[in-house]
Image: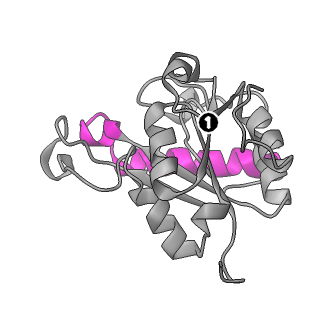
Amino acid sequence: MRSEEQRRAVFLDRDGTINQEVGYLHRVEDFVFIPGAPEAIRLLRGAGFLVVVVTNQAGIARGLYDEAALERLHEHLAVELAAAGTGIDASYFCPHHPRHGVGPYQVDCACRKPLPGMLLQAAADLGIALADSWLVGDKLSDIQAGLAAGCRPVLVRTGYGTATEPSLPAGVTACDDLLAAARLILAGEGREPRSV
């Protein structure tokens, strides 16, 4: 039985889920929302969910950009979401890669999805009940991280989602985009496999 203190969350992958997938996104001028994403975040937060971004950032590991560039991008995301009347409650990122990292970023870590480290850390930091929470992403690694953490995962067909869908584990729901996923979550559906 979960404590009354614990809260529900929707964990969101970033690239290909919230914003267009452009490959190692790090420049503010390349950031473009997937249509409906700000509305989806607003709906989820309005329903009492914490919205937490969990994103692998192998571009940092590879030396393509640094953590300061990621911070600038997340500040831009916050400004754009605020203009849409919403926001993100917390963001977690993994800057590591086990094979292609440079220097201290070449680490076989516990935070890189498909491992659940970022979700577990967020749950500890924010008092999240993982069994009452969801994860939405466009890659199999997102889905696997959600399952490993004990969340209910939903695949979106944006980003890499269409290519990922045939390899989904049984029982995982696929939706066209984040807005459709948010509506599914808010309708209390998703326990049975179905396509939206």
In reply to whether residue 75 is colored magenta, the answer given is yes
Q: Using the rendered image of the protein, determine whether residue 26 is visible from the camera's viewpoint.
A: no
State which quarter of the image contains the C terminus.
top right
Left or right for 11, reference 163: right
Q: Which residue is mark 1?
A: 171
Residue for point 51% across, 66% down: 122
Left or right for 48, reference 111: right
Residue 161 percent location from the top left of the image: 57, 24
Residue 163 percent location from the top left of the image: 52, 16
In reply to whether residue 14 is colored magenta, the answer given is no
Q: Using the rendered image of the protein, determine whether residue 187 is visible from the camera's viewpoint.
A: yes
Q: Main secondary structure of the magenta part?
A: helix
**Closest to the observer: 153 or 40?**
153
Q: What range of the chain is rendered magenta?
A: 58-84
**Closest to the observer: 84 or 190?**
190
Left or right for 185, reference 5: right
Q: Is residue 191 above or below residue 7?
A: above
Furthest residue to the left? 103
Q: Amino acid at mark 1?
A: Gly
Q: Regarding mark 1 in the picture, which secondary structure is present there?
A: loop
Residue for point 16% across, 42% down: 102
Residue 83 percent location from the top left of the image: 80, 47
Residue for point 71% across, 29% down: 177
State which quarter of the image contains the N terminus.
bottom right
**Closest to the observer: 6 or 12?**
6
